[in-house]
Structures are given as C-alpha cells and as structure tokens.
Image (cartoon, rainbow, N blue to C red):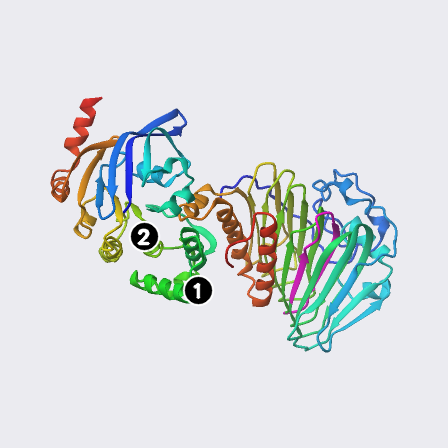
Amino acid sequence: MATLEIHDLHVQVETDNGPKPILKGVDLTIRSGQTHAIMGPNGSGKSTLAYTLAGHPKYTVTGGTVTLDGQDILAMTADERARAGLFLAMQYPVEVPGVSVANFLRTAKTAVDGQAPKIRTWTKQVNEVLGRFDLDPTFGQRSVNEGFSGGEKKRHEIAQLELLNPKVAILDETDSGLDIDALRVVSEGVNRYIEQGDRAVLLITHYTRILRYIKPDVVHVFVDGHMVTQGGPELADELEAEGYDKYLKAARADV
Amino acid sequence: MTQLSVDTATTATSPAGFPTPSAVVPSHLHSTPSWDVADFPVPQGREEIWRFTPLKRLRGLLQAGPTGQRLTRETSLPAGVTASEVSTEEAKGLGGRPPMDRLAVMAVANAGGALHVDVPAEAELDEPVILKLTGGGADQVVHDHVVVTVGHHAKATVVLEHFGSATYDAYVSVVVGEGAQVNLVELQLWDDDAVHTGQTSVQVGRDASVTAVTATFGGDLVRLTQTTDYASVGGELHQYGVYFADAGQHLEHRLLVDHATPKSVSRVDYRGALQGKGAHTVWIGDVLIRKAAEGIDTYESDRNLVLTDGCRADAVPNLEIETGEIAGAGHAATTGRFDDEQLFYLQSRGIAEDEARKLVVFGFFTEIIHKIGVPEIEQRLIEAVTEELSVTVGAPANA
C-alpha cells in the first residue's frame, strides 16, 4: 500500500519581476486504490503541482512537505522520485531526438526496476502494450516524441504508465488535445492501471470530459494555488454545468 | 536548439577554373592550392585561415623538416587492391587538389614519398580497405603522404583509422574515377596528447558518388582541411562528421567544396559536442559555386551541443556564388546549450542524470550517423561514439 501525502505545500517560480508564489498551501492525501481528480481553471497552479511533485528544477518549494510512504520526496532528484514510484504523464512531452522509443523504454524500465528486463519477454510486452494504444511496432524505432502527433504523444505517455507501472501516477491534462477515439484508448489504459486495485492516481484536468471514462473517487476544486473544496463524482457534474465562476469569485473576494 | 552564434559571409568573386594558377578566386577565405612550400609562408596567427588555431600547440609542425619517422601502418587490402610506395612526384601526378596551407604542403615536402593504394576499375569490394595508423608517442614528428585511387565504376569502402599518439601532419588525396561509388571513413581516435594536422582532398569523378565520414574524438589538437573537387559533371558528395571535444581539446575541421562543374551535388552535415574547460571546436564550411557550376545543388550544416560552461564552438559557413543558375544552395550553423527539458523528461522516468545526459548526446550523434546509410560504417561509428561517451559522459545503457 502506498500513500502520497502533501501538507501545506508552498511553491514559487522565478520570473523577470522576481519570485512569484503559485502554490499557496496545498493539502492532499492519496492512498493506493484511490483516484483523485483535481479540477480547476487555467492558471490556478494545477500543472505547477504536477511538476513540483515530479521534481522539475524550475519550481522552488518554499514551505510544506510531500512524502511517499513516509519518505521525504522533496529531498529527492527527479529520477529518485521516479524510482521511488512516482510517475508524471506530461501535458507536453519533450522531444528527445536520436533516442529511440525502444531504447528509452528499456532504459527507463531498467532504471525503475533496478535491473534490465529479460529481453524476450520485454520486447513482447512492449509490442503488446504499444498495440493496445494503436501504436504499431515501428513506433519503437522512432525518436522519443519527435514528430509525434498530439494523440501519439499522449498514448505514448500512458503506454509508459502501463509498462513502468508506478505506485502513484500523476496525469497532467492527459485529455487535452485528444479526439474522442484517442481519449477512449488513453482512458482504457489508465483504467487497466487503476483496476490493479493497489495503485493511486492524481488526475489533473480542466474539463470533465475525461471523467466520463475514468471514474474518480474524490474530486477536488483547485483555485489560486490551493484546494477550495472537494466532493464525490457529483462535484464534477456541477462544475460541468456551472463552471468555475463561483470559486473564482470567492477567491477574488478573499484577496 | 537556440541559435547562439552564426557567422556568415557571402561574397561574389570573379570567374575561375581550378586548378590553373592563373584562374584563382581572389578570396580571403581560402588560399590558392600549390605544391610549393614557398607559396605558404609561416603564418603569424591572425590570418583568416589561422585565426582559430592555437599555433603554439602545433609543436613546431609549421617549420619542422623531415624526420624519417612513420606511424605503424597495418593495412587490410581486399583481393585486387594494391598498395605501393611511390615517389612524391609520382604521387602528385595521380591527381587531387594540391595543398591549401602550410601544414599540408609541409606534409608533402617532408614525407619523402607516398603510399599509393589503388582500387582497380570495376572492382566491387566486399570488404573495406583499411589503413590503421598508430603513433608511438607525442614526441614523434611524422609527415605522411597517402594517395588512394579508385578506378572507374568500382565500389569501395576505404577506412583511415588513427590511434595512439604522434605529432602528425598528413596530406591524403582520394581520386575517385567515373561512376565509382566510394565510402571514405576517417577516424581520429587518438590518445589525448596527439596532434594531427593536414589535408584530405577528394576528387569526385564524373557521375561518381562519395560518402565521406569523419569522426574526431581524440587528440590535443586536430586541424583537418577537407576539400572536394569535381572532375566533371554529375558527381555527388555526401559528407558527414561527428566530433566531441573534451576539456582542453582543440578540434578544427575546415571544409571546402569547390563546385566548378555543372550538375554536381554536395550535402555536408557535421555535429559536435563540447564539454569541459577550454574545449574548443571550429567548423569552417566554404562552398564555391563557380560560373560553370550550373544546376548544382549544395547544402551544408553544422550543429554544436554545448554541455558545460567554459567551451567554445566556432561555426562559420561561407557561400561564394558566381552563378544563379543552380538548383539550390544553402547552409546552417547552430550552437545550442544542453536542453534541460530533455534531461527532466528522461529523469522523470527514473533515468539518473548522468545516464540521461549520455542518452541525449548519444541521440544527438546517432541522428546524423543513421543518415549515412552504410550499415557497417554506422555500426563502427556508434561503437566509436559509445566508447567516447563511456570515457567522457559515460556509456549509454543500450545502443
């Protein structure tokens, strides 16, 4: 069983006008077997939360704690966090020219497992997983994310989720830019991961569309750098009908 | 990749025809070819063709007389290929652009004869011709002269490999006959204290095709002039280079492609990585498109990846165009810093920073290596890159 615990997290970024606070006291606990959706308007800090958890050097933590099974992950480098069991499916996956998908997947698998996968079973597994995401076997010979369509990038991210099988998955706007078929394929991949029963998911999204395919246990509303409310799946329906206006007005009134 | 520095010069010059001395392009960018040492006075260091080179680190090669020293030479000659010693005069008569600078002319003047390797006409070699040259120590001053002739319609791969250490100055000429297809590979895998200078001149025969591949990883100072001429119409040059400069290394490649005949093609694609204090690379890409060169098509590119502070990459492409009746002419040069987003992406998948760096650099090089299109050469270069990265950035996990 894994527990990701975020307590009073404050994060800032450097800008031309000096440091700018983005996260202003985030509290969240996610346990194995749970799927949490974080919903919020653009600019609320959702992606900052995702990248901070993954260890992107651009974000500076100024307060609070994040632990995974009691271990302080803020003290870890990005690769150490991944080896500890965190995975971030990125909104904008990065191109790595000249590094083939096959080489990348094998290197990543070796890193998170601490040993190289058995070549024969691994190749078979990779091809099966790529196939489930409608990515043909020649996909493995292409350079990572280079020249991929938006849909291919997202399918590749979730294929990695399935192959690396981390304890905790953070999905940052995985639904953005996907047509309905790709959304279904990607959601099925996430659901296979969830159905193992002992994995935790933090699903970050602006829209409720993906929640028709992936059922969250808890929905959080995220505005101006912190959680403003939480509820069950019905909260997503409310947001679909009414939008974020109510919460944005409340946030402004606070200032 | 962000573009940090590009230095471009485009000049029009008067008509000329190579190699008659009277028909010389009056350009400051490159000198007039000549076999005569007197035509190349000892440079002071500020001249255009010398300004990037630390002359003091040439260990006296600009003035050194003959030493009689040789590199250890191991040759692998497929059936039908011959290697023989010829006199300097005979070697000059075999063809190829004469020396372009003091170092190349000193190599010819002091080598005391040349090695002539001949691939007969219409031979189709299954195995490469390999000249493995090994130096016995940095204090050994060696002048060398090699001529490779490939007969018409032959198919051959010729590999020059350099190992060990020496203070080495060589003039190499590769004369490719009509319709021949040649892969020319030059590997500079020297120890850290070697000096390697000189010139490699390729002459492409009518409708012949040459794929030239250079990899420079070793050496304290390497300065190679690489020239291409077309003997007649329709020749093709595909030239690829990779180099990796570590702390203190100076690696300089000076290319000249002289389009003086119609309908020829040149494609030049070089890539370099730099890391460590004082790592310096220089890439000069001169292309001449003379009046007669109608219908030619040329493009050249050099990209540099700077891994740490304290490095310097100079990349200077030059096009001199005397006719507008061409299919295409272009060039590009970029120098970029290591992309931290690539590093983060790989690290977010559990790959440790060192290994992630290796992967990115390996990818940067393999991208160009896979364009070569000759599997054996690609494999050989990937091995060389892997070896280099294992010593410097560390070995990639998997090829």
Q: Is residue A204 left or right of residue B376?
A: left
Label 2 element class: helix
Q: Quadrant of residue B122?
A: bottom right
Residue under label 2, please give it: A154
Tell me, yes or no, whether the highlighted magenta stretch contains residue B198: yes
Residue A197 sits above or below residue A52 on the image? below
What kind of residue is marked 1?
A: Ile
Task: Name the chain letter of the residue that bears numbered label 2.
Answer: A
Between B263 and A28, the one lying in front of the other is A28
Are callouts 2 and 1 both on one chain?
yes
Q: Is residue B22 visible?
A: no
Q: Main secondary structure of the magenta part?
A: strand
Q: Quadrant of residue B91?
A: bottom right
Residue under label 1, please give it: A119
Task: Name the chain letter of the residue that bears numbered label 1.
Answer: A
Between A51 and B26, the one lying in front of the other is A51
Q: Residues within 10 Å of mark 2 (few under 14, many from 20)?
A: many
Spatial CA span between label 2 and label 1 = 25 Å
Q: Residues within 10 Å of mark 1 (few under 14, many from 20)?
A: few
Q: Is residue B42 left or right of residue A8?
A: right
Disc 2 to disc 1: CB gap under 8 Å: no
Q: Position of residue B262 (x, y in %)?
A: 63, 63
- Report the magenta residues as a range: B183-207
Q: Quadrant of residue B118?
A: bottom right
Q: Is residue B135 visible?
A: yes
What kind of residue is marked 2?
A: Lys
Residue at image point 29% right, 62% down:
A132
Between B21 and B9, the one lying in front of the other is B9
